[in-house]
Image: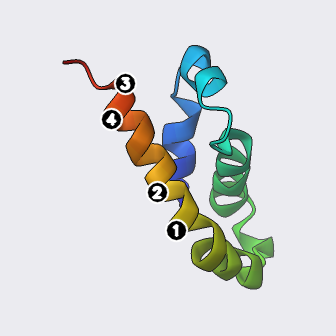
Amino acid sequence: MEILGQAARLVPPGITARYAKVPWSKMRGMRNVLAHNYDSINYETVWATIQLDLPDLLPLLQSLLDQEEPP
């Protein structure tokens, strides 16, 4: 999740604007909590994110890659 959040920081604004359904700010925010506030991580929230949000996120990101990949 930290890697996803770090990668989200590097996505250009034009891409994030085109793919507004991807929760870019939430991904960056989760990364910041995991990397910097590790002493106050709510593991139930992390687990819920893994179980409920990640399965929907992966197809969104794959679709983005498929559409943005150069021919």
Give percent across and percent down for residue 13.
Answer: 62, 18
Identify the element where label 1 is drawn: helix
Q: Amino acid at mark 3?
A: Glu
Q: Is residue 10 visible?
A: yes
Q: Which mark is residue 68?
A: 3
Q: Earlier in the sequence, mark 1 or mark 3?
A: 1
The residue under label 1 is 55
Q: Amino acid at mark 2?
A: Leu
Q: Amino acid at mark 1?
A: Pro
Kindly report the distance in space between the C-alpha atoms of the residues bearing marks 4 and 2.
12 Å
The residue under label 4 is 66
Give percent across and percent down for residue 47.
Answer: 65, 81
Q: Is residue 14 above or below residue 38?
A: above
Residue at the limit of the structure toward the left, as seen here: 71
Q: Amino acid at mark 4?
A: Asp
How many residues crowd mark 2 within 10 Å: few (<14), some (14–19), many (20+)?
Answer: few
Contact between labelled residues 1 and 2, with CB atoms less than 8 Å apart: yes
